[in-house]
Image: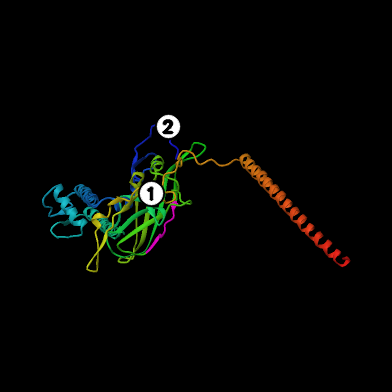
Amino acid sequence: MNVDPSPLPPRGRGRKVWSGTRHVVAYGMPPLGWRDLYHHALTVSWPVFFLSLAVMFLVINGLFASLYMLGTAPIANLAPGGFSGAFFFSVETLATVGYGDMHPQTVYAHLVATFEIFIGMSGIALATGLVFARFSRPRAKFLFARSAIIRPLNGRMTLMVRVANARQNVIAEARAKLRLMRVEGTREGYTLRKIHDLALVRSEHPVFLLGWNLMHVIDETSPLSGDTAESLAACDAQLLITIEGSDETTSQVMQARYTWAHDDIHWSHRYVDLIHEEDGVAHIDYTRFHDIEPVGDDADTGVPGATAPDTAPSCDTPAPVATAASAASTSTGATAATAATAATAATAATAATAATAAGAGGAATAAGTHHESGPHA
């Protein structure tokens, strides 16, 4: 995305959106309002949800109480009199309680009560469905380590992230995807945020019950190849992980995601061990789940790529690509060098062959002379 250095002032009211790492205010989107009421009902907090139901309940009963008051003595045995009595009668009608003391006594009151009962039954059905939908929504309880680490492992620099199943139930056939997001530039000066897939050593877990260490090897094919902490900060790099799997208890698909900013990636560190055994029983201490510790200087490990490169990759412009002229020049130079080498080798081979042939001919002539002179002798 290209950022205009002098943008126009936004028009209208903005909408705040959480991107996973920061808030973004979006302008110009069409207002959804009542068209997306179901989504709002599912995403608001429980206190706001029940408060909204209570407000709607009071507003609806207040409206119907006003309608009852428009009639002439519409309710028999109205107590207390006036608007308060009509309001309580509306509450009883909307909830289909039917105490029997107060009841409609005019055609107008019966029509209003009929309409209110229809609204009440529909409202109860909708509210029940919303409560059930909110309770039955699948919510994964995955715990992500607050820090990602990069360390030597098996002779290669490896990016590691740690995840745990806080609910500690079986998530069958869990699948994970790790991605790198960073700001990159083009030769035309266009800036955009690109997403790179990071291949995992193992992207699936058959039984995700306790914990999972996900690893990405930083080799020549990795998007992180040659990067340093400074280059990731310059590119505003982020790591995004998505994990999903089937909950064995509810048979629902669980999904969770987490984002690490560039300053959450710690180089030359390792995760603290959580498991220890006592009397043959394994114990896991999740109180140290987020703890990390240094593993030493990478320069002393002898791991290829462990030390910082002389020139870190730039986020502003991509690496230059050889032009046709330079490629042709290189090809011509290589061809000339190859031809010279071949000519030299051919000359040396010819000389050697000639010398060998001359030696062999001389030996053959001497042998022949001796052979021919033998009989004559």
Secondary structure, mark 2, is: loop
**Which residue has dot 1 on it?**
300
Q: To which quarter of the image does residue 370 belong?
A: bottom right
> What residue is at 48 percent from the left and 51 percent from the top?
220
The location of residue 246, given as percent across then percent down, is 35, 63
The location of residue 346, given as percent across then percent down, is 71, 50
What span is in magenta?
A: 197-205
Which-is-in-front pick, marks 1 and 2? 1
Q: Furthest residue to the left?
A: 80
Label 2, residues with CA under 10 Å away: few <14, some 14-19, many ≥20: few
> What residue is at 11 percent from the left and 50 percent from the top?
80
> What residue is at 36 percent from the left and 36 percent from the top?
12
Label 1, label 2: how many angstroms apart (C-alpha)? 45 Å
The location of residue 228, given as percent across then percent down, is 40, 44
Q: Furthest residue to the top?
A: 6
The residue type indicated by label 1 comes to Asp
Q: Which label number is shown at residue 5?
A: 2
The residue type indicated by label 2 comes to Pro
Q: Which label number is shown at residue 27?
A: none
